[in-house]
Amino acid sequence: MKDYQLDSKEFGIRTADLLIGGIKGDSSTIARQLLSKYDKNISTVSLVMGDPGINVGAKVLFRNTEKLYNLVQEIKGMNNVNYVKWLEEVKVIGNKNATIVDTLFDMHD
């Protein structure tokens, strides 16, 4: 089965992950606000765990660093948001395309 994907970089579109910390247990509200307010920039929003200061993750699309900077500043200004960091993928070193089937049948756990 062939997998066809558009390379966003070919169109001048870059991607970044946002790591967002919310206060007062308002993660779901922050996530919904991100989806509605930034629907042209944000492709996915998730509630996340791991780092105690980060509880919302978002994948964003942008054309230049200034647009990303402005988006991050706007999100920092949202109610109950106290932390926003971003990461941009610069270069893919490899892609193993692991699937759920691979993980289910991994006998090394």
Image: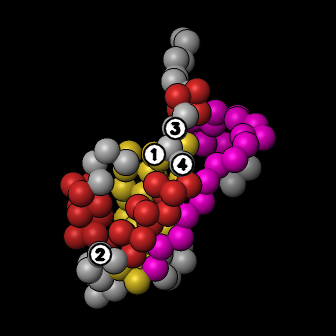
Q: Quadrant of the C terminus?
A: bottom right
Q: Residue at x 55, y 12 (%)?
A: 2
Of circles 2 and 4, the one toward us is: 4
Q: Say if 104 sits above or below 88 in the image.
A: above
Instruction: Give the labeled residue for mark 4.
Output: 64
- Mark 3 and mark 2: span between their CA atoms? 25 Å
Q: How crowded is the residue under tag 4: few (<14 C-alpha within 10 Å), some, or many (20+)?
A: few
Circle number at residue 13: 3
Image position of 80 with respect to 74: above or below: below
Q: Residue at x 37, y 48 (%)?
A: 41
Secondary structure category for the residue under label 1: strand
- Give the extent of the magenta segment: 83-107
Q: What residue is shown with label 1?
A: 61
- Image quarter of the N terminus: top right
Q: Who comes first in sequence, dot 3 or dot 1?
A: 3
Please give the residue where the numbered disc 2 appears in the rendered image.
Answer: 78
**Horizontal arrangement in the rendering, residue 48 relative to residue 25 (left or right):** right
Q: Earlier in the sequence, mark 3 or mark 2?
A: 3
- Looking at the picture, which amino acid does disc 2 mark? Met
Disc 4 secondary structure class: loop
Q: Please say if the residues under marks 2 and 4 sit with CB atoms less than 8 Å apart.
A: no
Work out how far the residue at label 2 is from the one at label 1, CA to CA, in angstroms.
19 Å
Q: Residue at the far bottom: name it.
A: 24
